[in-house]
Image: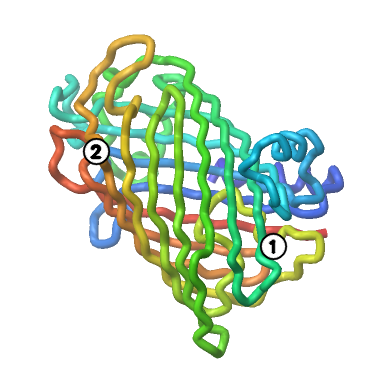
Amino acid sequence: MRRSLVLLLCASLSAACGLRGGRVAVLEENDVANIGDGLDTDRDYTQGGFAALTLSAEDTPDWARDAAAAVPLFRGATEIHLGLLLGQEMYTPEDLFARRPNPDDRPYAGWLYAGLALEGRTLDTNAERRRDRRDLLELDLGVVGNASLAEPSQALSHRILGIDEAEGWDNQLENEPAIQAAWERRWRALRGDCGGGWSAEAIPLVRVRAGTVRLDAAAGGLARFGWNVPRDFGPTTVDGTGLGKDASRPSPWAYLHGGGEARGVVHDLFLEGGTFEDGPSVSATDLVHDATAGIAAGWGPLSAGFSQTWRSPEFRERRRYHRFSTILVAWTWWF
């Protein structure tokens, strides 16, 4: 709620400063909202909150355009958008009431960060074919450890939901600065028009992340089927869809989507302990895969989506898959 209020305030201030358009997105990932589960499901990647403000191409500052022009990945892009991000992630072991670390389970960890993102969209001149491409470069700076405020954030949410509070946060990873860079490409490889406004699409993706937080590479994609499917690239926080100079308010739309990705992991701070100091750790697996299914819909400036993700074990001491849900709400405005 506080994140949403802050974003709405930022949007109001930006409007007062003369911005011609923008998109505010709030995303919540949590295993407490899993389909078919009760509330007492905190473990592994237990919560992630993200908020993003995406500026229109016209309002993206010159320094961001110049930076994009210097990157070959954005060559030929028809639109450049700047995104501002704020996020928090938290990780816990399965037993929240053990006061000592379990050597066979992951440690407590939190990660609080702010980031900048450049989104470059290369749109097909054939609007029906839509062989579009999207590149995203993101740089996040933040802190891991007690300073991430993961413990009080989880305690507050547990009190609101009436869940017992975790007792092992004293064993979380030590405070340290953290940096993370990421590049992701999505493109529309296939689109079929089914008539009556119905269509189907296939959107592959590749991603590379490097920094003190993670070092990994992923490949995957999603397929979706729906009515009046927007010309975007699936659920994402930094998204300039509808923020073009002559964009009009979209008609009602909805679609179902499903997909997955495989990820090769070289380093994961949240499993391997601290970068500068040794901390509780487990043995990270080299390959992790996700499967996701969900639904998204929108009308005018408002859009929302829900999805469920199934993740393979991330460390060798764990054989069980992990599940978490994602809720994404976005509001786009034009002037």
Amino acid residing under circle 2 = Glu
Q: Earlier in the sequence, mark 2 or mark 1?
A: 1
> Which residue does the numbered mark 1 point to in the structure image?
242
Return the x and y of residue 32 as percentages of the image width and height: 31, 49
Q: Which residue lies most toward the top here? A: 277
**Res. 2 visible in picture:** yes
Q: Which residue lies most toward the bottom here? A: 196
Q: For the C terminus, which image quadrant?
A: bottom right
> Which residue does the numbered mark 2 point to in the structure image?
314
- Tell me which residue sits at (51%, 61%) in the image: 234
Dot 1 falls on a residue whose secondary structure is loop
**Callouts 2 and 1 close, C-beta under 8 Å:** no
Q: Which residue lies most toward the right here? A: 18
Return the x and y of residue 318 as percentages of the image width and height: 15, 37
Does residue 143 lie above or below 1 as drawn? above
- Tell me which residue sits at (43%, 28%) in the image: 111
- Mark 1, Cα crowd under 10 Å, few <14 / some 14-19 / many 20+, is many
